[in-house]
Image (cartoon, rainbow, N blue to C red):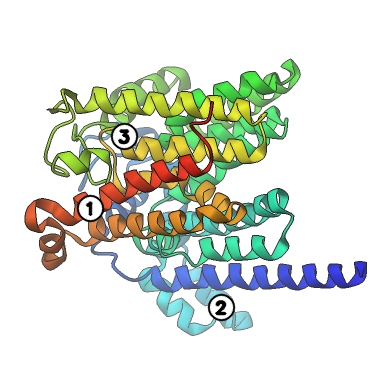
Amino acid sequence: MRQLKISKNRKVVLLLLAVLVAGFFLRALLARYYTAESGDLLLYADWAEKYWLYGSQNFYTYPVWYFAPPNYPPLLSLIYGGAYWLYEHKYYLAELHNIIKIPPAFFIIYFYEFGLYLLLKLPGMLADIGLGIIIFQLVKKISGDVKKSFFAAAFYIFNPVSIFLSGVWGQTDSLVSLFALSSFIALWAGKAWLSIPLLFLSFYIKPNWGIFIPLYLFLFLLKKPQVKQIISGLLVAGILFLLATLPFAQGNPISFSKWLWGERLLPTATVAHRASVSAFNFHSIFLTINKHLDFHSYLGIQANYLGFALFTFVNLISFRYIKRQKLSLSSVLVGIFSIGFGGYLFLTNMLERYFFHSFVPMIILMFTTPRLLVYGILINLSVFANLFYSFFRRSWGELADFFGANNFLLVRAFSLINLVIFFLTLKTLKFFKR
């Protein structure tokens, strides 16, 4: 019996490997398409080229840019700069092919034309593979069911949401989530020395997980890590900070970072000042998406104040739930899902892809709590509609007209679905139980 179980597990692991490889190549095949529609990707390509043209120390301060000056943290700028360097040295592929016939000629032709876009998308594509492995491991740890773990990982790898974000749009939300989610899991496992630098890496790519700082501090207080672990984690994070910042700093990296975050990064986070920039969320039910400002009043209060109050309430009940569940792994994932999706629903200035903080925890919960499966699928469909609309609305007029018809009725309907399913999910998890 034991040998039979090992054999079955090995078969599932091999199938998982096949799924991961197939998922990666599917994303790579899509990397050449819709590059003109992705204004973000064209922006990243401009940054990648200018990193070498202007020099790293002038990268953030140079005044003239084709699209917009760089407004992402240094680590992501290094990644994009590295992508352009690899693309500029593509002739090595031809030399290698002449020697050993690898890589094949068709790939070299493809890479010469689309290689830069592929390399810019590569971090997100590889992060998807990493997240698939994390989903497999966590579902197996919670449920003890290897087959269920496999189907959960496959659900993510072949999910239109994850494929579209990394393989088509070229976003790095999966890379940010890979480090941040790993940080929370490491903290839960009592490895603060590892959690701290992982969280730093996430923030130094994009600070999207900033909404989870209260949750992280709450878990930190509950776990009470040893002082030596905290010091070790801070030391490693400090070294990573210097390595990533020194190439850009003109002098003191601390003063440079203060200028960068104060003058460039943080001010652009809410530059739109919309109740909802492009998210199908709570504000989109009552106000017009990408039109009403975040200080517009409805239900007797400004949108930004109302959203923050609701988000604070979600945080508080999430903390209570985690404590009531005695800090179980499932409760931490529930907390990340509720706060992540709650931020997407209730905070102002939300983009369509900011639901992604909660996406991986949602999939894990779907496959470990069967009653949530239908709810998860409905959220999946709704957020994909949000992504599809946001990406193609400028280049596909009929789509914009379809979603905007009857005073954006379809947008409001999807927004209401998100809100109702979020509430039903929390109710199913007994979130409101005293």
Q: Nearer the viewer, residue 420 or 231?
A: 420
Q: For the N terminus, which image quadrant?
A: bottom right
Residue 398 visible in the current orientation: yes
Q: Secondary structure at mark 3?
A: helix
At a point 65% along the width and 53% down the height, the residue shown is 139
- In depth, the one of 80 and 358 nearer the eye is 358
**What's the distance in space between the residues labelled 1 and 2, CA to CA?**
49 Å
Q: Which residue is mark 3?
A: 346
Q: Position of residue 178 (x, y in %)?
A: 55, 46
**Residue in the picture at 19% in, 31% down:** 273
Please name the residue that numbered disc 1 is placed on: 413
Residue 350 versus residue 215 in the image, above or below:
below
With 128 as the anchor, is 270 left or right in this view? Answer: left
Residue under numbered circle 2: 103
Q: Is residue 93 left or right of residue 4?
A: left
Neighbour tally class for label 3: few under 14, some 14-19, many 20 plus, Cα within 10 Å: many
From the image, state whether disc 3 or disc 2 is nearer to you.
Answer: 3
The amino acid at mark 2 is: Pro
User: Identity of the amino acid at label 1?
Assistant: Ala
